[in-house]
Image: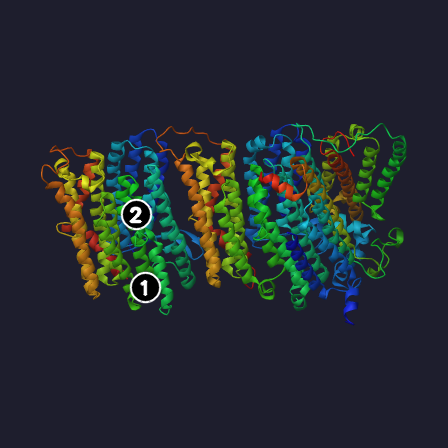
Amino acid sequence: MKKIALLITLAVGALLILAAEDFPRWGDAHAPANDYLSPYYIEKSLEETAVPNIVTAVLADYRGYDTMFETTVIFCAGITVLTLLRRTQRKAPKAVRPRPARQGADVILQSASRLLVPVMQIFALYVLALGHHSPGGGFQAGVILGASFILLALSYDLKTMLARLSENTLLRLSALGVIIYAGIGALCLLLGDNFLAYAALKVFGFSEVMAHSHGILGVELGVAVTVMAIMFSLYVDLASGGDLDEGL
Amino acid sequence: MEQLPFLPATPALAILVSLLAVPCIYLSDQRPNLREGWTFAAAFAKFFLILSMAEWILAGNTHTYELCRILPGVSLSFTVDGFGMLFALVASSLWIVTTIYSIGYMRGLNEHAQTRFFICFAVALSATIGVAFAGNLLTLYIFYEILSLSTYPLVTHHQDEEARSGGRKYLTYLLSTSIGLALPAMLITYTLTGSLEFTSMGVFPADTAKPLLTILLLMFMFGFAKAGLMPLHSWLPGAMVAPTPVSALLHAVAVVKVGVFSIVRVLTGIFGIDLLAATSLNTLICVIAAFSVLVSSLIALSQDNLKRRLAFSTIGQLSYIILGAGLASRLGVQGSMLHIAMHAFGKITLFFCAGAIFVATGKKYISEMVGIGRRMPVTMFAFFVGSLSVIGLPPAGGLISKWFLVLGAMEAEMFWVLMVYLASSFLNAAYFLPIVYRAFFCSEEEAQFERKVAEAPLWCVVPLVLTAAVSVLFFFHPQPFFDLAVMAVQGR
Amino acid sequence: MADFLPYIVAKYNYWAALVLLLIGLYGMIAKNNLLKKVIAMSIFQSAIILFYVSMGDKKGSTIPILLHGHGEHGALAIDPSQYANPLPHVLMLTAIVVGVSTLGVALAVLQKIHRVHGTIEEDEILESIEE
Amino acid sequence: MTAAQFPILILIIPLLAAFAISLFGGRRDKLAYGLLLAAMSGSFYAALQTLLLVLETNIPIHYRLGGWAPPYGIELVIDHLNAMVLCLVSGCALLTAIYSLPTVRAEIPDRIHHYYTLYCLLVTGLAGMVATGDAFNLYVLLEISALSSYAMLARGRGNAYYATFKYIIMGTIGACFYLLGVGYLYIKTGTLNMADLFRLLAEEEMQQSITIRIGFILIMIGIWIKMAFFPLHGWLPNAYTRASTTTSCLIAPLMTKVSVYIMLRLMFSVFSVEFVYGVIPWHEQIVWLASLAIVAGSISALAQRNLKKMLTYIIVAEVGYMVGGAWLANESGLAGTVYHILSDALMTLALFMAVGAIIHKTGKSSFAAMEGIFRKMPVTSAVFVLGGFAIIGIPPTCGFFSKWYLIRGGIETGQWLFVGALLFSSLINAIIFFRLIERAYFGDLSGHGHGPLPERDEAPAVMLVPMVVTAAALVIIGLYTSEIIGRIVLWTIPAGL
């Protein structure tokens, strides 16, 4: 097996080395990849969407369809892990648990995280809101939010955390996020334009450019909600092996 | 163009009518009389639909009906011409007779799954008529395959180990040859010529390479294995495990004749007699068929099981027909077409007799039938008439067709074929006449039956008397079939 | 030889990605421990991400966020060569997410395997399946 | 909303239904089931309308997502080929959805609504892959369908986890190869839109570029792994065999067929006929490989004693049919491949449904389950027989006509190996199916058919109806071959072939 693997790897390697022959130089500003579509995005995104962060503009508007499915992928992963690991009726109790039981509460850890978590969450909202102007956006915000919950779950324990943010809530939130995204798209559809064509939102009284900008904000919010919920849900399921009894 | 005296769709209706009977038969599962009523209705409807076209065809016309274009360039179409009409008439009229017979046989033996039996029979007849009226090779192939599959449950009707192995052999031979040989041959033909229509000139351009033609010819001849050409014949004796009506109608008429019919159609309609004669490929056909004729007759001599003997006799007679077509002469082809009809009536009589003997006495083996003429005189007399027809002696129809086959051989100046015909006729006589002789003439101590007439049920006896009578009738009055065969040949 | 070195240097972003990719591929096929396979899978995906992102780079450019993006300067002349190509970043954001999702699912399946077979060594699993 | 929105509705309806089911379906199974049916019907309706629109105008439909013009935005492009495949995907999904409830209840005891959520996501992913006109978007949707299928396969009967894990690894390698290949195209052309790629790749310089060629090879290998083309098929039989009934009914007919569609799409809408058959000089060798796939798949199928596993090896052989047909480089072969996508999906569906019903009723999946099935489940066994006939290629089922075209393609190019392999596999399939039919027909090996007859115990009507519809479709499509070939398939033949 190892020899076959080596052979395959070498063959693929040789193929890929060959392919490098007519690659453009690294960093060449006039390589085809940099010279064809990207100038359009760089020059027009502000004009068309009022979003200076070009990555955000492309992500949530020009290629918003991709991003919707990307959010769906996360949702799908969440559901998948859940269906795989969780069983409502467990037949046999789990075998030997390798983890030592936690002794008592860790005061320092808990106090520190209590201080940290609000800051993290506010920062996450900031990242979300400022995604138009600086590095950030829905994914980043969602991950930070998710991390704040995971921190809580780590420093307290899983049960405490789940009492505040139950599994069902997580699931609803994750679906809700994608529904926000797809719903905005479908709203454009109902308003008579193409799917995800935010320009249709101008019926709410924005200019067309601002309609794009607000549309982007809306879908970023949806992304953030889903990513947050699934991040935490993945942690919950994976860390407890699906039993939701105790975390790491 | 004259007004058609029948609906344009009549050929399609003639095929469909027995399919339409299928749900009716299925639904009247619990009421045998009604069920058989449906079969009769379908059989008569089919016969009269076909008969309604006969006059028009006899007047020298042909009729083509295109059902749908199934592939670009190839349609599912039906052409009624002399040859097809001849075959369809034989098959559909014999279906009526066989239905009468099978009622007697199946009820006489109290067989199981009779509904399935009648359903499959109806489907098989649809497919047979479909082959008869097929307007091109693809249509023919489609119905050919349907026939193979619909007869499988009939062959394996008894559902025991023997039936199972017979059925397995049956399908293996028929499917593997049709998929493995006939289908690619058809596709190669289509790729080469772009046409699958039957035309008397053949579809191949004159400059087609001879080796290729030879290969295609062999693929077609062995691809339609229902014709039982040796060495692809052994499914036929194996299929004799089926109930006798099945053997009678299918393995004397429908299935085997479909094989022969397909081969003759391909020889006359795809290759064209002229091309065969010009490339002298017909000699090859003759050699293969002659080999089959002689060897199968010799094997038949050694069989003790009556139905098996009949089966080997059938193999030989089928090869007669191919041999006739292979002569590539006008009279030869005419003779081979006639032989389809003549042999059908003769052989079905023989099978009916074998079945009647089985129903009445339970005997299968010839050695156990010494003196049976005392007990079943009518049956054995019909058997005698059937043998005469198959051997080709007057006063039975078999003589007529054999006469033309012999004339064809002379016309083609292939005298060795003549010898083959004569030799095999002797062999036929040698394996049939002793049965009849021993049935009637034997000493008291040899006889295994008492001198008390106890025939099979009337349902069984009437059909076999009927077919025997028709065989004799054909000797005196072969005109309609004769005309059809002449027309089919002159059509080219 | 004189041409060779510049050739290597001109594309060294690519060589780095290539090496990572092959490590990942080898690990996914050859490793016996399923967890190592999952790790290799992650490396493999990261290599592709690296490859994409590096091809969007331009010498001397900055991140693709417009300076003076708001207010009245907004519509002033923008020089595309100042900013890196945003498209590969966008694509790779998606690919990262896909990678994480696949990783999550793979780990969940792995936990199940461990629970059922009691091991994550491939040969031992195969043995226990055959029994 | 106008008729122009139908293309996106095919995807959006199941997508939104997925979320709706995950939110509300937990309360009652019937609610989840109802939502699923509604979504699949809607999607199928939209797909049919799209197909009709394409057939009416004979012009591809371009749908701009977000209203952005390609190549800057993403577009859906629906032409004859993918309109047909979309109908196929949503149609099969609808039939399987109707069929699903009894088996899902029996095999997946809890969280049915999550299972149905994944079902919808899988359909979305498949339909999205088919509809899209963007090479990268294809990757994203590929991953959606892959992830949801991992989950559905893992929730199989018995121990499906190891098989699923192998599938995850192989699937990821396949998807990553595809992504890498797209990266190579992007680095040379700077675009991801398929039509745009086609335009740029037609240039002479691109045709000669080794990067593009290797990109093409990587993409093809990636897709081949996904479609389980021999010898990259190792993951498929185990994964599909252990899957639950509904999962295999959904995935087995559609996954490989959609992958074949993607291969065709990339071969002719991104690359060109000249490039695929001219610049890459290997099409003959690939046909040989396909022939090998057919032979190997058939022989492996013959060796199996488990119904589902046997069917999975038949899928491997059928993939060989389609890849071979596509690389024959002539019109007949390609037409055969396109037609076979349609017919093979339906016959696989019919067979998996019938086998699923048999397993559902008898609880066995070995050949022993077939014994006496003709009496016990006459309708199911009729469907099974018809599906088997289609696989063997007996007229007038559609399987015959696809084989007709494929063999013709082989004869025209003189690829006798491929022709031989096709005939060989037909014969092997005949043996396989008649062996089973014999068992089903005769019942117990020792019985003589006159003993006590087994009770009639047919599957419930919700399972029978979709089965019968599928089986009927096999014959109807066969009879309308000429229509389908003329109005759909011939339009998909790229210019220059």
* Dots 1, 2 in contact, CB < 8 A: no
Crowdedness near tag 2: few (<14), some (14–19) or many (≥20) residues, C-alpha within 10 Å: many
Position of the N terminus of chain D by quadrant: top right
Coordinates of residue D365 in the picture (x, y in percent):
51, 37
The amino acid on which the numbered mark 2 sits, given as a three-letter code, is Leu
Residue D219, disc: none
Image mark 1: chain: B
Q: Quadrant of the C terminus of chain D?
A: bottom right
Query: What residue sits right under mark 1 in the picture?
Result: B201
The answer to whether A145 appears left or right of D64 in the picture is right
Residue B373 in the image: above or below residue B318 = above
- The structure residue drawn at horizontal position 76% and vertical position 49%, both measured from the top left corner, is C93
- Evaluate whether residue D266 shows in this view: yes
The verdict on a common chain for dots 1 and 2 is yes
In the depicted view, which residue is nearer to us: B51 or A60?
A60
Q: B244 or B394: which is nearer to us?
A: B244
Does residue D192 appear in this view?
Answer: no
Residue B201 screen position, x and y as percent: 32, 64
Mark 1 vs 2, N-terminal side? 1
* Residue identified by numbered label 2: B236
Please name the amino acid that badge 1 sits on.
Met
Left or right: D343 in relation to C126: left
Seen in the picture, residue B105 relative to B195 is either above or below; the reply is above
Element at label 2:
helix
- On the picture, is D51 further left or further right than A133? left
